[in-house]
Image: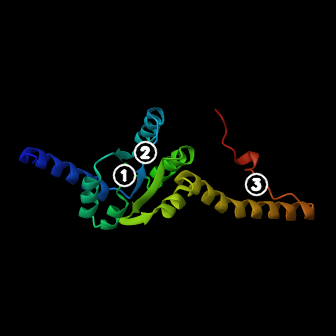
Amino acid sequence: MPSNKILEQKKQIVADLAEAIKNSPAGVLVKYQGITVENDTKMRKELREAGIKYVVMKNTMTGRACEMNGMEDMKSYLNGMTALAIAGQDPIAPAKILKSYADKIESFQIIAGYLDGKVVDEQTVLALAEIPSKEVLIAKLLGSIRSPLYGLAYALQAIVDKDGEAAPAAEEAPAEAAPAEA
């Protein structure tokens, strides 16, 4: 039977994990069996650089942390060798990074996740991984805003060219009105 000190340490670990889950917008649960040390090291580095916390913990402890956040459904996915990637600012980043490894490594598998405190299945996590990054979405938005303006500018230019007249130039101040240099 574990001592009170060990039980308190485990309770603190579960509480810390529950707090990390609570403060994150999303997370991805994977079965990491079969990943080589080399690939695992590269993956962990990518996750760390993206601000993602990657946790390998006993399933019972992960289950308790999920339970503390009202995600009891996650416990049904917690069997075998599992790890949880907890998103930092970008809720899509863990899905993107882990999907790239799941595509390369047959035994490495995305099994579930959570989004805004709700448990989601594998298909939802994979769909999240397909969403373009925030920067790409912003660029597309700006491009779609600019496109009609360019179209209008080209149409106006074509009208001016068709009439054979140049657009009126800004009038310059007469030479007499220019200040004299000393």
Q: Residue furthest left?
A: 4
Disc sitting over residue 171 in the figure = 3
Looking at the rendered image, the quarter that the C terminus falls into is top right
Residue occupied by mark 1:
80
Labels 3 and 2: the sequence-earlier one = 2
**Front one among 38 and 88:** 38
Q: Quadrant of residue 70?
A: bottom left
Residue 143 point in image, percent of width and height: 66, 57
Disc 3 crowd, CA 10 A, few/some/many (<14, 14-19, 20+): few
How far apart are labels 1 and 3 at the CA level? 78 Å
The type of colouring in the image is rainbow
Q: Residue at image x 23%, y 62%?
A: 68
Residue 124 point in image, percent of width and height: 49, 64
Instruction: Decide if residue 165 is on the left or right side of residue 1.
Output: right
Q: Amino acid at mark 2?
A: Gln
Q: Amino acid at mark 3?
A: Glu
Instruction: Decide if residue 113 is on the left or right side of residue 176.
Output: left
Q: Residue at image x 48%, y 61%?
A: 122
Disc sitting over residue 1 in the figure = none
Disc 2 crowd, CA 10 A, few/some/many (<14, 14-19, 20+): some
The label nearer to you, 3 versus 2, is: 2
Residue 159 point in image, percent of width and height: 86, 65
Residue 167 point in image, percent of width and height: 82, 59
Labels 1 and 3: the sequence-earlier one = 1
**Front one among 165 and 74:** 74
At mark 2, the secondary structure is loop
Q: Amino acid at mark 1?
A: Gly
Where 43 sits versus 149, above or below? above
At mark 1, the secondary structure is loop
Q: Are marks 2 and 1 in contact (CB under 8 Å)?
A: yes
Residue occupied by mark 2:
33
Labels 2 and 1: the sequence-earlier one = 2
